[in-house]
Image (cartoon, rainbow, N blue to C red):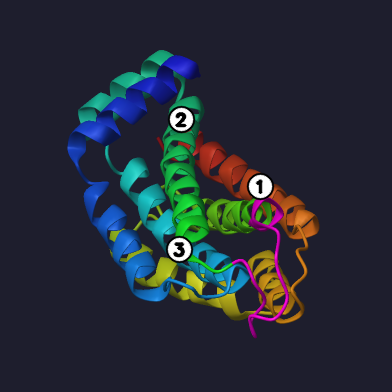
Amino acid sequence: MTALVRYQAALFAGSYRWLPPLLVYAAFLAIGVQTGGPILDAYGYAAGGLLPVAVWLTRVCVANEPPAARSCTAAAAGPARAHCAALLTAAGAALLLALAGTAFVALLSDPRSTDHQVAVPVLPAAGAGLLTALVCLLLGTALGALCSWPVLRRPGWGVPAGLIAALLVLVLGASPANAALTGMITGSEHGTVTAPWLPLAAAALLASGATALACALTGRRG
C-alpha cells in the first residue's frame, strides 16, 4: 500500500490539478481570517472551508490516473487497493492544507474570546482547531469518495452532488462537522477550548464506511 500511495502522490503532484483547490483555500483563508480576530472563530472558519476543498481533492485524485494506467495498477495490486491509495492520497493532501491553515490562524488571530475579554491558550486552541479541521477533512474525503466513480457512474453528477452534500454536512445539526464547528463558536463566546473528540470519532467511522464502499464497488465495476 505504501508503494501505491507514493505512486498516486507522485501522479497527483505532477498533474498540477492540486493547484486550483490550493488557491481557492488560500484565498478563503486570506479573506476570512483577519488579523486580531478571535482565534477559535477563525479555526472554525478555516475548518469549514476545508470540507468542500477535501471533496474537490478527492475527486481529483480518484480521476487523476489515465484509464490505461489505472487498468495496469488494478491488475498489479487489485482495484480496491489502488482506489484506496487514491483516497489516502487525497486525505494526505487535505491534511497538509489543514496543518497550513492551523499555523496561519495561530499567527494572525488574537488568542481571546469573541468579545476579546477572556484569554484563550494558544496551544490547546490550535489542537482543537486541528481536530476540527480533521473532522471536516474526513467528512470531505468521504463525500468525495461517494460523489465520484465508481459510486456515481455519471461524472456530470459528481460536482453538484458533492457541493450539495458538503453544504448539508456543514449546516445539518446531526452532522459531526456541524457539531465540531458549533463547539468552536460556542467556545469562542465563553473563552473555553473543547476538543471535538466525539465528532472526530463519528467522522472517522463515516469516512471508513465510505472508503470501504467505494473500494468494494471498484472491484465489482472494474
The picture places residue 113, in percent across and down from the top left corner, at 67, 76
Marks 3 & 1, CB-CB < 8 Å contact = no
Magenta extent: 111-125
Q: Which residue is mark 1?
A: 209
Q: Which residue is mark 3?
A: 108
Q: Which residue is mark 2?
A: 85
Given residues 30 and 131, the one toward you in this image is 30
Does the magenta portion include 22? no
Q: Mark 1: few, some, or many residues within 10 Å (few <14, many ≥20)?
A: few
* Mark before the other along the chain sequence, 2 or 3: 2
The amino acid at mark 2 is Ala
Residue at position x 34%, y 74% in the image = 31
Residue at position x 53%, y 63% in the image = 47
C-alpha distance separating marks 2 and 3? 35 Å
| Mark whose residue sits in front, 3 or 1 | 3
* Mark before the other along the chain sequence, 1 or 2: 2
